[in-house]
Image (cartoon, rainbow, N blue to C red):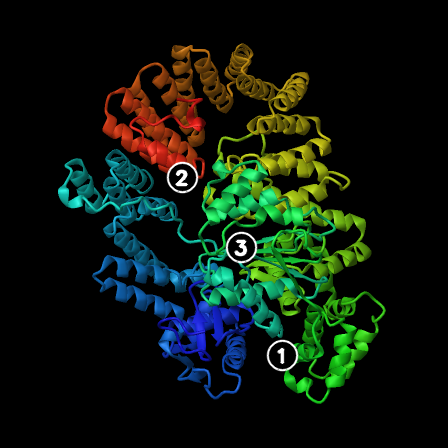
Amino acid sequence: MLPRAGEPEVGSARFGLLGPIEAWRGNERLQLGRRRERALLAVLLLEANKVVSAERVMDLLWDGSPSETARASLRSHVSRLRACLDPAGRNQYGVRLGARGGGYLLETAPEAIDANRFSAFVQKARATIDASSRATQLRSALNLWRGPALADASSDLLRRRLATELDELRLIALELAVDADLDLGRHEQVVAEVYRLIGDHPYREGLWARLALALYRAGRQAEALQVLGQARDRLSGELGLDPGPELQKLQHRILTADPELAGTRPAETAQLSSLGPPHQVPMDIPEFTGRDLELTTLTAMAAPAGTGPGDSPVVCAIEGMGGVGKTRFAIRAAHDLVRRGWFEEVQLWADLHGFDPQRCPTDPAAVLGAFLRQLGVPGCEMPEDLEARAALYRSQLDGRRALVLLDNAATEEQVRPLLPGSGSSLVLITSRRRLSGLDGVQPFPLDVFTRSETIALLARIAGPERIVGNEEDAARVASLCGYLPMAIALAARRLRAHPTWALSDLVARLAVDADRPVGEASFNLSYKALPPQRQRFFRLLGLNPGHQLSARTAAALSGLPVAEADAQLESLLDEYLVYERQPGSYRMHDLVLAYARDRALADEPEEEQCAAVRRLLQDYLVHATQATLLIHPSESRRVAAADGRTGELTTATQAIEWTERNLADLVATVRRAVQLPGDVPDLAVRLVLALYRPLANRGHSRERIALNEMAADAAGDQLLYALVLEDLGALCGQVGRLEDAVQRTEQALAIWRQTGNHIGEAGCLTGLGIAYRQLGRLGEAVACLQDGLAINRRIGHLPGEASALNHLGLALQATGRYDEAITCSQLSIAGYRRIGDHTGEALALANLGWVYQRSRLPSLAIDCHQAALPLFRDWGDRYNESEQLWGIGQAFHALGDEDRARIHWNDAITILRDLDVLRPAQAELLLGQTVPDTPEIFRLNS
């Protein structure tokens, strides 16, 4: 494989700072040790070929407070880093680290460091006149980024001190790339990209200016002016600042239709693009050994998709027993194929949990939901039906070079919906079963290691000097470990930790457990070598119902402080008992997890087993409560007051990301908790209630209904049971199970009335009104909503009053009582604004816009839809954005302004096409009609 432009030659050292800190020797990734050593490397690389004083290094690595032993520790870190980078001490790989003048000097070629190559790309692009070449150079530069700069630095403070300049240069490069796209007429693409950038950098005026310019050039002048108004409100309302001269001048030029602002329009509207395609394949491991023939064979099998497209996707099922190394082989193969440049566009990964005795195999619908979100489909537009999700997934991947890695598959039925339809896609499946029932699958059986591979792995980890001359003992180690790569690696790690042991000593210790199941002898050896406290820590990790581990999760399970749990995880990482998927996120191999769980069940009292899950539930509940209040500040029924514990979330965006990232583990934890004694089931019910708001409108109806059904079965507290039933009724209504919705809501209503809970009673009456309206029972709907409204007003419950008014307005619309509907919607908007609920405000504005349409008041309808539009855009609700644009188009058509109607209709149709709500042919037909037919999805409102 040739090096990329500007990279050092193959075989020399390469370094990565634009993401997790990495070092490579040719195609071999080096194991850099603990986080402080990785941070040391970053400090020296950022000032490569310059002497960095020891005082500055200590100040950075110890966050400004170096301990008395810091200097000695620093020397040890430098020594280990030097041995890793240049083991022979001869600078044979183009890198040398040494002490110099009271500090340290790392010498290497500047182009060996990705941050330097990034800067060079950007500098070259600045000097390039041709916009197309400039855009290509800038996107190439941005593709060097693998995540936040120095993502796994030893502390957030260190990252801020070292990476701020790099982060700023990245933003500049993004702005320059946007400018190049504007010069090329890619206006709609720029709008999509800059909206997302503004979400992360809301006070950067240059981004607001570029968004307004893109909208103006796309023919959306009114929206461009709205964006400038939003920028002004954000700056003045939150910072007390007026917009700078750039924004003020741009507003004047748009208002006066300055001809110099006009730009070219592309022949075809570019499809929406995200800030970057998904690249989800987990990290590779530097100790990967052997499998050369298998890798060559798999590469040949993948070639039709990688160099094609071929006639159909290439589907390879990597099959073999547990512990044989299927997952690690698939990950190494995936990285090798991507390095060939074959599947750089899209890389998706999912653990299907096919063989976990403590949890059900992953629902393919949930996997498709996660994949579609990664591919840019908004959660609020996620189909609920499995087949619909699968069809949308195939459409999203059509024509794109995609690599899909499906780990731990249980059955053909689980995998079949996850297969793309495009011949430019490769699917790698790992399973302990043969999946011969899949059409077109190419089986790829993976056997245990050969004798030579075993010896090579032992030598690589323990050191060749420990193996040479002792090949027979090495073969005996392989036999005792069943030739399983994972068990052999654990044994080699144990040998490396004991320099005084001979290989025969390792054989003797493994032989003690020779009658145990294959591989368990190696696990026992590693486990028994741990100090007692770490043994307990390891056991308790085995009780994790989910699969993800972080320092916070481990702290909850073990009852240790977070910092201590983090250190224990690092130690288990050194022992190969956990592995790191990405910085700060750990997992256990299925066999190791099963071993840890067995040890916990055997060695931990039942009370401690229950306590570990209880502590984990409490930590999840803290975060779910925090997420609820960040997303929906007026929520008071589903979350309790904080008990002194604090989570790590500070923004609504973080709250949504935390919920999405942990959803599978949250479901698994609830499923386990409802089976435990004491107060643990009720704690699980409280967690389900706290997840109601964070999971709303994000395409998770299946998971939400499953959670609430488990909670309803487990709730011992009558009031918790009623609240779960109320939520379950609402969820059933959202997926069209209207009779179930009525039944569940009526059950909850009876409990609230029996216990005298008026807030609950009013909430259920509103829920019944919604279900009756959907069933067409409009008289009953209006009566229930009016009763709920009266109770909310009597007890002064403002959120309930605003909600009841909003839905009463909808029901009155359906009966033709438009004047009353307008009054209800106006009062609902005022109520939502009074309590700061922007989600409710946007929905009520949209509903008021439609009732104005029906009342033949199009100018007022435009005002409502335009007011709702930025609110929906703020949280990425593209379906409701398209509905407002359609409503504006309908209103302009009623006013006789066909040009502006056409612009808004086209924008709405384009969004529906990009969301796959409309097929391309349907969208093309509507775009060609003088007055387009109303899309089916809008007909209830327009």
Residue drawn at the location 54% of the way across and 41% of the way down: 389
Residue drawn at the location 76% of the way across and 50% of the way down: 608
Location of residue 163 with respect to 86 vertically, above or below = above
Measuring from the top left, give residue 439's x and y in whole percent. 62, 51
Tag 3, which secondary structure?
loop
Marks 2 and 3, how far apart at CA: 23 Å
The circle on residue 460 is 1
Q: Mark 3 points at which residue?
A: 313
Residue count near mark 2 (Cα–Cα under 10 Å), binned few <14, some 14–19, many ≥20: some
Q: Are marks 1 and 2 in contact (CB under 8 Å)?
A: no
Measuring from the top left, give residue 785's x and y in whole percent. 52, 15
Residue drawn at the location 74% of the way across and 59% of the way down: 596
Q: Quick one: label 3 or label 1, which is nearer the N terminus?
A: 3
Location of residue 578 with respect to 199 vertically, above or below = below
- Check the picture and name the quadrant holding the N terminus: bottom left
- Which amino acid is tagged 2? Pro
- Which amino acid is tagged 3? Pro
Measuring from the top left, give residue 460's x and y in whole percent. 62, 79
- Check the picture and name the quadrant holding the C terminus: top left
Foreground of the two, 105 or 599 = 599
- Which amino acid is tagged 1? Arg
Q: Mark 2 points at which residue?
A: 920
Q: Are marks 3 and 1 in contact (CB under 8 Å)?
A: no
Relative to 298, 485 lies left or right: right
Foreground of the two, 455 or 603 = 455
- Foreground: disc 3 or disc 1: 3
Foreground of the two, 756 or 507 = 507
Measuring from the top left, give residue 327's x and y in whole percent. 63, 62
Relative to 540, 274 lies left or right: left
Q: Quick one: label 1 or label 2, which is nearer the N terminus?
A: 1
